[in-house]
Image (tube, grey):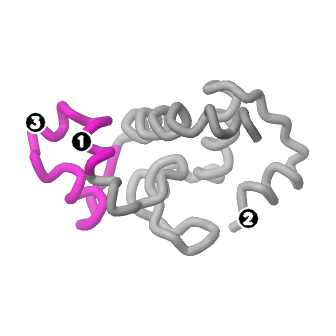
Amino acid sequence: MKTFKQYLAEENQTVQCDINGICKVIKAYESAGNEEKILGVYKDSKNLDTIGHGHLVTPQSEEIFREVFPEEHKKDPNFGSNVLRKGGRITPEQADALMLRDVTQRLPAVKKL
């Protein structure tokens, strides 16, 4: 799998530095035409556990899942753990919500670059 930087260079991508512009490019890169892949934990181009549209699985991911998916956690308090550690899956809409959270968190730093 190409790195995101390689993808941008090879595809001659220009990215609008806003939520819609960045999200559109990330979605195309991460799913690589296979949206089913991203609905569970998979290995990214650096062989790191990732889920959704590029959310790196870290020790903070379960807390992030509680923040982004409060309704799912009300129904199942182990929702984050089941998805991140036990082979569970998220929906395409949940993948989009997770990406929106991640991009929103990082957009100020991206704009500075």
The residue beneath circle 2 is 2
Residue at 13% x, 53% y is: 78
Mark with earlier residue (3, 2): 2
Residue at 88% x, 54% y is: 10
Residues packed near mark 3 inside 10 Å, few (<14), some (14 to 19) or many (20 plus): few
The residue beneath circle 3 is 74
- 72 shown above or below 90: above
- 76 shown above or below 61: above
Residue 11 image offset from top left, x and y in percent: 86, 48
Whether tag 2 and tag 1 are in contact, CB under 8 A, the answer is: no
Residue 67 image offset from top left, x and y in percent: 28, 37
Q: Which mark is residue 66?
A: 1
**SS for dot 2:** loop
Q: Nearer the viewer, residue 105 or 27?
A: 105
Q: Is residue 9 left or right of residue 51?
A: right
Residue at 42% x, 33% y is: 97
Which secondary structure type mostly characterizes the magenta part of the structure? Answer: helix
Mark-to-mark CA distance, 2 and 1: 31 Å
Mark with earlier residue (3, 1): 1
Mark with earlier residue (2, 1): 2
Q: Nearer the viewer, residue 69 or 34?
A: 69
Q: For the magenta stretch, what is the residue range? A: 63-90
Mark 3 residue type: Lys
Residue 28 image offset from top left, x and y in percent: 66, 44
Mark-to-mark CA distance, 3 and 2: 38 Å
Q: Is residue 61 left or right of residue 52?
A: left
> Is label 2 or label 1 in front?
1
Mark-to-mark CA distance, 3 and 1: 9 Å
Q: Is residue 87 magenta?
A: yes
Q: Is residue 7 left or right of residue 70?
A: right
Mark 1 residue type: Arg
